[in-house]
Image (cartoon, rainbow, N blue to C red):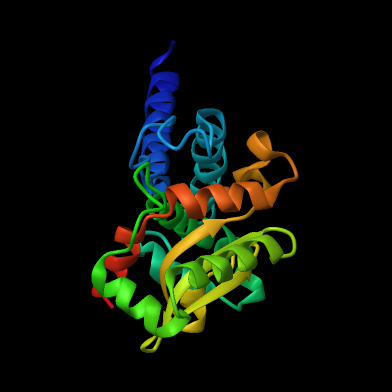
Amino acid sequence: MNPQTQRTSATAGANAAVREAAAVTFVLPPLPYAENALEPVISAKTLRIHHGKHHQGYVDTLNQLVAGTPFANRPLKELVLATAGKPEQAALFHNAAQAWNHSFYWRSLSPRGGNVPPLDLKTRIDSIFGDLDSLKEQLGTAATTQFGSGWAWLVLDGAKLRVVKTDNADNPLTAQLKPLLVIDVWEHAYYLDCQNRRADYVKGVIDKLINWEFAAENLDSA
Ligand SMILES: [Fe+2]
């Protein structure tokens, strides 16, 4: 290799390293439990693909989209709010919101979930919904009736708890609602385990996995 080629090669390598470093703005957060921890409701295979392929894909695409733009190095939540409702930023919004939604979803589930909510949250639930079963029913209805891909959420709307559902990548942050927990109802969340039986997945999640402690933490930080 002649000196010119060596210099060119070294420069190209350095530039590639800089590009690579600049591109890795957002990082896939690790799952807060083992891949098989949510079985039998959600299999290890589903979790591996959902987290390692789908969520990773949103993060990778987001990094490509923000590279070299003013959106790089901004907090993810800020990016979601800054791009919502702007058709020219639709791709950025979709991938940023999906990255945020999935990080929130993993924490909305727990191998020890589906139990009784902490007292403060339980008291709020009882005062708004009547009792925990009524909230579960509303959450289940939102999750099973969401047409196509989307999400079912428990949110804080001012001082009031509400159940809402959103389409595709949308999330309640853009409507000035504070998310407390979420259920992913995109087919990739359950199709390997339940095929078209979304209701089975939703029932399993609500009965056995929903992380009320996480919802209570979010309520406390409101
Ligand atoms: Fe998903």
Farthest bottom residue? 158
Left or right placement of residue 44 versus residue 127 in this view:
right
Q: Is residue 2 above or below residue 9?
A: above
Q: Is residue 181 above or below residue 57?
A: below
In the image shown, does 70 or 63 lie closer to the viewer? 63
Q: Can you see residue 161?
A: no
Q: Position of residue 23 (x, y in %)?
A: 43, 46
Residue at image point 38% right, 17% down = 3
Residue at image point 38% right, 84% down = 127
Left or right placement of residue 138 versus residue 120 in this view:
right
Q: Position of residue 119 (x, y in %)?
A: 25, 70
Total marks shown come to 0
Left or right placement of residue 171 versus residue 126 in this view:
right
Residue at image point 41% right, 44% down = 28
Q: Position of residue 164 (x, y in %)?
A: 56, 75
In the image shown, does 23 or 133 lie closer to the viewer? 133
Quadrant including the C terminus: bottom left
Residue at image point 52% right, 75% down = 163
Could you say which quadrant of the image residue 126 lies in? bottom left
Q: Position of residue 173 (x, y in %)?
A: 46, 75
Q: Can you see residue 59?
A: yes
Quadrant including the N terminus: top left
